[in-house]
Amino acid sequence: MSEVTQVQVEEALQQYVVPHLNKNVLVADALKSITIDGGMVTIVIELGFAVASIKAAMQKAIVELVGQIPGVQNVSVEISWNIASIKGQRDMRSMDNVKNIIAVASGKGGVGKSTTSVNLALALAKDGAKVGLLDADIYGPSQQMMLGVDESARPESENQQYLLPIEAHGLKTMSMGYLVTDKTPMVWRGPMAGGALNQLLAQTWWGELDYLIIDMPPGTGDIQLTLSQKAAVAGAVIVTTPQDIALMDAQKGIEMFTKVEVPVLGVVENMAIHICSECGHKEHIFGDGGGSRIAEQYKVPLLGALPLSLRIRQQVDAGAPTVVAEPESDEALIYGDIARDMAVQLASTGSAGPVFPNIVINND
Ligand SMILES: Nc1ncnc2c1ncn2[C@@H]1O[C@H](COP(=O)(O)OP(=O)(O)OP(=O)(O)O)[C@@H](O)[C@H]1O
C-alpha cells in the first residue's frame, strides 16, 4: 500500500476554503499540525473566531477531501479557536478580562438595532464564544424585554462596589432597564444619562468575555462619542434599513466612528426584503440595494441582510430572540453568518499592523 505523505495532505487541504475567511486553510494560517500514522491522519486547525455551530460541517468536508488520498483509512480533524483581544481596556478593573468591545449602532431609531444586537450576541455565544451584552439605550432600554428577563429582576452587587450582570440565554447582560423604573425622574434619564452610562459600563463586573456587545443609543451625539472613546471600542457595526433617510443617518454613524478611529466592521441591512408568508413573493418594500451602496461608498463590508420577518419580530418581542427560539431557521442562520463575518473582520483589524516601507540597498 502506498504511503501517505504530508505533501499529499497539504495538497488536499489547499482545496478546503475556510468559511468566512475565503482562503484555503493553509493560506489562512489556520493549520496547526498534520500527523500521519500509517493510514491514520490527524489534522489540527485553530481559528481566530468561534465556529461551534458549523464545526461538524467543516470537519465533514475536510474528512471527505483528505479521505480521497490513496492509503488513507481514517481522518480525524480537530478544530478549536483562540479569540484575540484587538483593543484592550484602559483603567477599568471591572473590564480587565473583556477582550473585545463591539458597538452596534444606528444613526436613526427604530431600524432594528436592538433586535440585531441581541441576535448577534446570541449567535456568537452559540458558536462557543463568551459574550456579554450591554443595553446602552438609556432612553428606551429594550433588552430586558427582548431577553425575557423578569421585570422585577435587579442585578446583585459585589462588595457594594460592582454590579453583577444578569445571565440570560447564556449571555451576561446589563441594562439601564434593570435599574430605572417608569417612576425614575427624567432628570436622571436626560442630562446625567451619559455619565450614568459610563458608570454602568465600568461598574459591572463583566468577568471573562471574548466579546462585549454594546447596543448603543440611537443617534450620533455626544453620548455615543464619549462611550466609544471611554470604552475602547474595538469595532462598530452599523444597522440600517434600506430607506434613504435611514441610510443618510447610517452614513453619519460610519463617519462618527471613523472620526474617533474605531474601525467599522460592516453594515447590516435590516428589513431588507419582505417575503409574503402566503405566496413567497419577494418585495423590496423600503428600496433596493441601499446597504450595499453605502458599504461600497465607505469601503466597509456589507455583513448581511435580514428580511422583514414576522418571526423575528414576534420572537424578540416575546423574550426569546430567533437565534435561541428557532436556531435552524433561515433568519437564525443569517444572524450566525453575520456574527462570524463580524468576528473575522474584527480579527483582521488586529492583524494588519503597521506597514513599513520595503528598504532595498542597491550596491551598484
Ligand atoms: N428584521 C425584522 N423583521 C421584522 N421586525 C423587526 C425586524 N427587526 C426588528 N424588528 C421589529 O422592529 C421593532 C423595532 O426594533 P428595535 O427595537 O430592535 O429597533 P431599534 O433600532 O433598537 O429601536 P430604538 O431606536 O427604539 O432603540 C421591534 O418591534 C422589532 O421586533
Image (cartoon, rainbow, N blue to C red):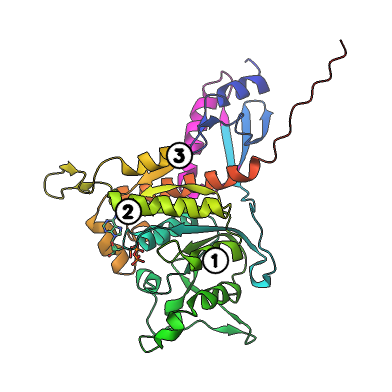
In percent of width and height, residue 247 lies at: 34, 50
Q: Nearer the viewer, mark 3 or mark 2?
A: 2
How far apart in space, not on screen, are marks 1 and 2 (Cα)?
22 Å
Q: Residue furthest toward the right?
A: 363
Q: Amino acid at mark 3?
A: Ala
Residue beneath the point at 42% across and 70% down:
137
Name the image quarter holding the N terminus: top right
In percent of width and height, residue 317 lies at: 29, 68
Crowd band around label 2 with a 10 angstrom C-alpha radius: few (<14), some (14–19), many (20+): many
| Label 1 residue SS | helix
Q: Which residue is mark 3?
A: 57
Determine whether the beta carbon of the residue marked 1 sits less than 8 angstroms from the nearest atom of ligand 1.
no
Residue beneath the point at 18% across and 43% down:
283
Examine the rendering and report whether any part of residue 171 can be seen: no
Circle count: 3
Residue beneath the point at 80% across and 21% down:
360
In percent of width and height, residue 328 lies at: 34, 50
Q: Amino acid at mark 1?
A: Leu
Confirm or deny contact between disc 1 and disc 2 (CB under 8 A).
no
Q: Nearer the viewer, mark 3 or mark 1?
A: 1
- Mark nearer the N terminus (3 vs 2): 3
Q: Which residue is mark 1?
A: 227
Q: Nearer the viewer, residue 170 or 95?
A: 95
Part of the protein shown in magenta? 47-74
Examine the rendering and report whether any part of residue 173 can be seen: yes
| Label 3 residue SS | helix
Q: Which residue is mark 2?
A: 246
- Mark nearer the N terminus (3 vs 1): 3
In percent of width and height, residue 45 lies at: 61, 38
Q: Nearer the viewer, residue 348 or 15?
A: 348
